[in-house]
Amino acid sequence: MILKILFSFQNLINKGNLTIEVSNFLYIKVEKEKVEINIKDIERVKNLLKIFSKRKKEKSIFNSFKSLIKKLNDIGEQFKRENKKLILKVEGKEILILGESSLLFKNFKIKNKLYLIKLFL
């Protein structure tokens, strides 16, 4: 549902972009073909995610990682279907690109494994 709204909003953008700043720790830049999320403070974002997340705690790191990969694949598939990308950055460094293929994954590309683990686990 949220992704459909995002894609509809992106289609309204003819040129240029919209940048949203959340209290100096999270920046979201929306363009016609891509969305960039730049995280400046990982811990504040993790705390924010805990507040809004309804997920149950996984019993093992393996199950947690497996669940994360499945969710990333599902979301990446939706971006790929719309010919759009979501780029996740931490401190300006690309971590993850949804909607782009890689050797290991069909619908997303991991650019920096260490930051990805730090953010999601």
Image (cartoon, rainbow, N blue to C red):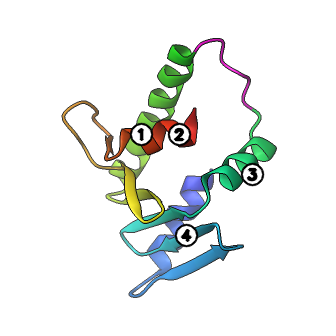
Question: Secondary structure under badge 4?
Answer: strand
* Crowd tier of the residue under label 1, counting other residues whose Cα lies within 10 Å: few below 14, some 14–19, many 20 or above: few
For the C terminus, give its image quadrant.
Answer: top right
Spatial CA distance of label 1 from label 4 is 22 Å
Residue type marked 3 = Leu
Q: Residues at badges 2 and 1 in contact (C-beta under 8 Å)?
A: yes
Return the residue at label 3.
48
Of callouts 3 and 1, which one flags the residue occurring earlier in the amino acid sequence?
3
**Residue beneath the point at 54% across and 15% down:** 63
Return the residue at label 4.
28
Residue situated in front as seen by the camera: 113 or 76: 113
Return the residue at label 1.
114
Q: Residues at badges 1 and 4 in contact (C-beta under 8 Å)?
A: no
Q: Up-down: is 88 above or below 105?
A: below
Q: Within the magenta stretch, is there residue 59?
A: yes
Point out the stretch of residues depicted in magenta.
55-60
Whether residue 49 can be seen here? yes
Residue type marked 1 = Leu
The image shows residue 77 at horizontal and vertical percentages of: 38, 42
Left or right: where 18 falls relative to 32? right
Q: Within the magenta stretch, is there residue 56?
A: yes
Return the residue at label 2.
118
